[in-house]
Amino acid sequence: MKQSFRFYLQLAFALLVCAFLIVPVVLSMLAGVTENFFVGLSSGFTLRWVLQVWDTYQMTIWRSIVIALACLAVTLVAGVPLAYMLARYKGGNSRLARVFEELLMMPVAVPGLATALALIMAYGQYRAFRGSLLFILVGHVLFTLPFMVRPVLAVMQSSQLAVLEEAAASLGASMSQRFFGVVIPNVMSGILAGALMVVTLSVGEFNITWMLHTPLTMTLPVGLADSYASMRLEVGSAYTLIFLFMIIPLLIAMQWVTQTTRARVRL
Amino acid sequence: MSQPLNSTSPSPISAKPLSIRLVQCAKTFGNGAPALEPIDLEIHPGETLVLLGPSGCGKTTTLRLIAGLEFPDAGGRVMFGNDDVTDLPIEKRGVGMVFQNYALFPNMTVGENIAYGLKIRKMPASERLAKIETLLEMVHLQGLSHRRIDQLSGGQKQRVALARALAVEPKVLLLDEPLTALDAKLRETLRADLNQLLRKLGITAIYVTHDQGEAMALGDRVVVMERGKIAQIGSPQDIYYRPVNAFVADFIGTMNRVTGVGRAGQISFSAGAVPMASVKDNQTMTAMFRPEDVDIVPLETVGAEIFGDVVSTFFMGDRTRLLVDIGDETPVIVETRRRGVWHAGERIGLRVPEHAVMQLPGKPWEGEERP
């Protein structure tokens, strides 16, 4: 009897998850391809709304992709050496390094709106900068940097990287030869995991971007909010559909990388 | 694996062996704890010097000072031949290093690992390939050049690490517990190979270990270290037969000790006596002897014997180890190659030949804990 009670409890939980996680997504996706959602699915399916979104909001999609890639480039160039420094500073057990690592997480903990407001207050008077995509990029880098640093740092700390580097040094390799020839290839799994995370988060970032954007620097998620507020429900849903098609491959890739990383760390 | 090294293969080491000198080298780490008291150490060209001691004794720190992975406190100097290399980092010192955990690059194949240092030195690819083959042959791993590192056994990994270290023709080979991660059987074969290789190459080598068997087998000279100091330097025989203090005596092999009073050229105590010509009458003295030097004798013999009761016996195949209670706190350990069976509780006689009885210089033994 007790067994069956547990079964029903689990079933209820599974149904709850379905109700709140899957049903809304499916409904939203269906709405995007339905002729008239208020009439129902019987009104027929169409790609009209998707094409309308493509015509109206195409630029936000390209912009989001450009920003995500630029954000990836910056977090790679800044984040990987930073992780390396945090891992190696004072033999890797420095309290200062731990504090710095926590500080990096600040823009994730603080509401994005506050971060954005602070950015505007500090640098808003530089009009050209304020109005450019660079301004959005700064906000995204602040938000995504820890997601690059952390996985890379984790791999650096779990592998015997320090001794590998000592071995390379004993063979005559200079600091830069060691970094590019030994460190980077051996933390690749962490870099890959971080990179996918950064791109995914940057593509979906709303809070900071909404505060920082101008009509000329609108990104995909901000465009989504815009369409929800001012367009037919079907258009907003079609827009969501496009967003999902962009983000799902990234999520799958991330899952795959996490698995291969686990296999590699054991080595 | 233990076939003799191929003597026709050209030696990868062409440079003249190097002497190394540490002058007043001390090392204090960030937290203020001294890892190494100021030490002076001279390593002769072409010799294999073993740094031996328990963990935390400073042996690895000493090796890292020589490697250039650590730098001595102010005032210490590291000399390679006539060159002062104290301020040179490891990549400028031309040392070859072998690590306990192999430290092979997992992103490279066996061949790429071996060629890493050659690539850094910009050796042309064709020469590199030839050199990889020579080195693989030297460590008995012919044909494994394209293997991935995770496809190798522990012993193979350490052979690759050795080949990689020797590829750059280092002036000195530094080995940091290279056999510790291997299982016992493999350790023995690799030890024998390593021994042959070091002799053949004639390279100056410094070998860190906590295993006294390894130290004895490989070292031309052994440096026993204790708490950041050098306790004794000498040949393996010196260290084993003539330990300078209680620490060395106890750390190397097993040592029995008995304390008694001098009486007619013997040290005499309640369970019997051991011979020692130099002892003065009525002088309190501690004598030491190795388990393998003790003879088991019939109970009725009269002379310098010890009598005791067998506590337990361990048959070890080639020998039998007996623990014999002679009324002291710690039983006397006896190892005999005689084929006999002894039982717990049995009373036996023991005789220690005079040449096997050791006495520490200085004051009589202060009872110290065995490690």
Image: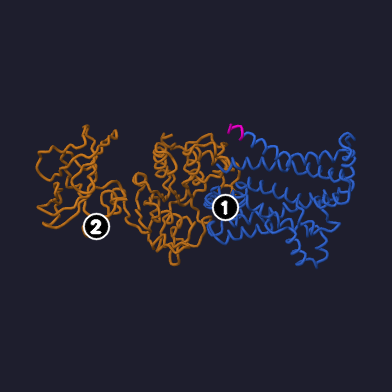
Chain colours: A blue, B orange
Amino acid type at image mark 1: Ala
Q: CA distance from mark 1 to mark 2?
A: 51 Å
Q: Which chain is disc 1 placed on? A: A
Residue A173 — which label?
1
| Badge 2: residue crowd in 10 Å (few <14, some 14–19, many ≥20) | few
Which one is in front in this view, the residue at disc 1 or the one at disc 2? Answer: 2
**Residue at the image point whose x is 48% and y is 39% from the top:** B154
* x and y percentages locating residue B146 in the rendered image: 57, 36
**Residue at the image point whose x is 10% and y is 40% from the top:** B301
* x and y percentages locating residue A110 in the rendered image: 69, 59
- Rendered image quadrant of residue B194: top left
Residue B360 versus residue B84: which sits nearer the camera?
A: B360
Residue B151 versus residue A151: which sits nearer the camera?
A: A151
* x and y percentages locating residue A210 in the rendered image: 80, 56
Pointer 1 and pointer 2 on the same chain? no
Image quadrant containing the C terminus of chain A: top right
Q: Which contiguous range is marked in magenta? A: A1-5
Image quadrant containing the N terminus of chain A: top right
Does residue B329 appear left or right of residue A265 in this picture? left
